[in-house]
Image (cartoon, rainbow, N blue to C red):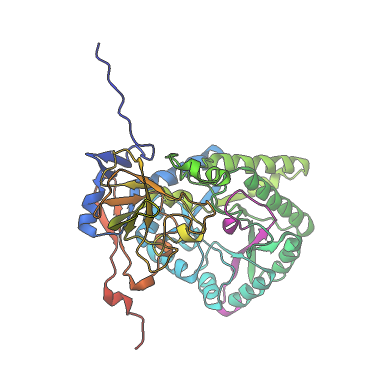
Amino acid sequence: MTSQLAVRHPAWTIPGYLETRENHLTINGVDALTLVREYDSPLYVFSEPRIRSNIERLKRAGRLVNRPVRFCYASKANSNMRVLKTVRASGIDIEVNSGGELFKALRVGFRPHQIIFNGTSKTDAELDEAVGAGIYSINVDSIYEIELVEKAAQRVGKRANIALRLTPEIGTRSHLGLQTALLTSKFGISYSDVLDAFRRALLHPELLHVSGIHIHVGSQTPDVEPFAEAFKAMWEHLVTLHRETGHALEHINLGGGIPVNYLRDKSMADQLPEHERDMLGAELEPSEVLSAALNVARESARAASAEHLLDRVTILLEPGRSIIADAGLVLTTVRNIKRRPETNDVWLLTDAGYNLLLSMNNYKWYYHLVSASRAEATSDTDYKVAGPLCDSGDVYFDIEREGRLPDYRSLPAAVQPGEVLALLNSGAYSLAQMFHYNGRPLPAAVMVREDGKVDLIRRRDTYEDLVTNDVW
C-alpha cells in the first residue's frame, strides 16, 4: 500500500483564492507575476469571488438570528466603482461618509433607501444632497447637527430621515485611533445628552423623521462584549424614548468593526506585542456579534415588557474591513538592494511606500509579506524592507522602536531586485487612502473574476495626471 504525503500549503493560503502554482502566487488561479508584467508594479489586486464570499458570510449570519438585518457596506474602506458594483450585485446596502461617496453610491446604482450617511462635519451642500436624494438615514453626530438637517429639509422641501449617533464610553482592544465609542473620540452624542437630542429632533416632525439610533464601537474589534454592551445601551434609550414620547424607533445601527484575521500565517506573530496579536489575529464571527446583541436586548425587553418594540426593530451593521480587507493585496517589486556591513542587515527597497499603504505608517498595521515569485519557498531569511519615498518613516517596520511591527521581514534566501512581493490582506483602507507623495503616479488596480478573467478597475496614473488640477 503506497502512502501519500499530504501537500503542505503555506499558512497564508486560502483555498480557491490565494494559492501557489509552480512556485508563484496565484489569485483565483491567475499568476501574480503575469499581472505585474501586464499592468506594471506596484499593483492593487482584488478578488471578486472573495468579496462575494465575505458578503455571503455576513448574510448567513443575518439569517441565523431570524431577525430583520441589513448590512450596509462601509464604502470608506474602498470606494472603487467596481468594488461598489460587486457589493451592490451581492445584495447588500451601503454606508457613505461624504458627498463624494454618496455621489459614487448613487452613480453605481444603489437606491436611496439603501444608503445611510455618517460623518462628523457634513457640509450644507452634502446635507442638501442627502435630503434631496431621500436616503434611508442621515446619522446625526451632534445636537447642533439636528438644526443643520432641519435647515436642509427646509431648503430642499423634503422631510429628512435621521438617526442619532450615540457615544456611550465603550472601549475595545483595538488601536486607540480606531476606537470610536469613547468620550475622548470625536464621534457622536454623549450618552448623557442622547435623550435631550431625541426630544429636540422630534420637535419638527414635518422636517425630520427620527428613525433610529447608531453606535460604532470601532474597527477591528476582537471581542463580542463591546458589541453587546453597545446594543444594550441603544436598546435602553429606545425603550425610554418610547415611554416618554410614544415614538418608536425603527432601527438600531450597531456600526461596523467585525475583525479580519491578519495572522493566518503566524510565523511572525511572536514578534508582535500580545495585544496586537490578539487584535490582528481575531476570528470573531458576525453571527456571534448579532446573537450577543439580540440576547441582551431580549433580556431587557422581557424585564421591561417591551418585546413588542423589539419585534419592530431592524438591525443595521456597517461592515467594511470584513468585506474587502482579505479580498485585496498589493504587488510590489524589489527595485534596489543594499547591505549594511556595520549592522549585517540586508535592505530591500520596493516600489510600494506608505503613500499606498497609509495604515502601515499611521497605525503600524501589519500586512503579511510573501514572495510572489517564490511563493512555495521557505521564508527563513530576515530583511529590512522599505518603500521608495523620500521619508525615513517609509519602512515596513516600526522606526520608532516601539515594537508594533516586526523589525525584520522573513522571505526566501537571496532575494534580488526584480523579485515580486505581495502584501496580503491590504484591500481595506489602502486604495481609498493613497496619495501622490513625491510626485508618484498612483498605481493601477485590477479585479480577478470567478472565471479567472482580469478586469482593469483603475487605470495607472500618467505624469499628466499629476498636474491635471494644478492652476499655473
Question: Residue 215: percent from the left, percent from the top?
Answer: 63, 56
467 over 230 or under it: above or below: below
> Could you tell me which residue is drawn at 36 percent across and 83 percent down?
470
Question: Residue 70: percent from the left, percent from the top?
Answer: 53, 50
- Looking at the image, which is closer to me, 108 or 254? 254
> Could you tell me which residue is drawn at 55 percent across and 46 percent down?
273
> Could you tell me which residue is drawn at 37 percent across and 66 percent down?
389
Instruction: Name, please, the residue furthest toward the top.
Output: 1
- Looking at the image, which is closer to me, 201 or 229? 229
Q: In which quadrant will I find the N terminus?
A: top left
210 over 224 or under it: above or below: below
Q: How many marks?
A: 0
Instruction: Name, please, the residue furthest toward the bottom.
Output: 472
Assess whether residue 187 is covered by the magenta stretch: no
Q: Identify the image quadrant of residue 202.
A: bottom right
Question: Residue 456: percent from the left, percent from the top?
Answer: 27, 59
- Looking at the image, which is closer to me, 253 or 216? 216
The residue stretch that appears in magenta: 154-180
Task: Kindly tell me whether residue 141 is visible in this rendering.
Answer: yes
Question: Residue 252: percent from the left, percent from the top?
Answer: 62, 53
Q: In which quadrant will I find the C terminus?
A: bottom left
Assess whether residue 157 is covered by the magenta stretch: yes
Q: Along the horizontal axis of the image, is 466 left or right of 368?
A: left
Task: Kindly tell me whether residue 109 is visible in this rendering.
Answer: no
37 over 284 or under it: above or below: below
> Could you tell me which residue is drawn at 43 percent across and 69 percent down?
103
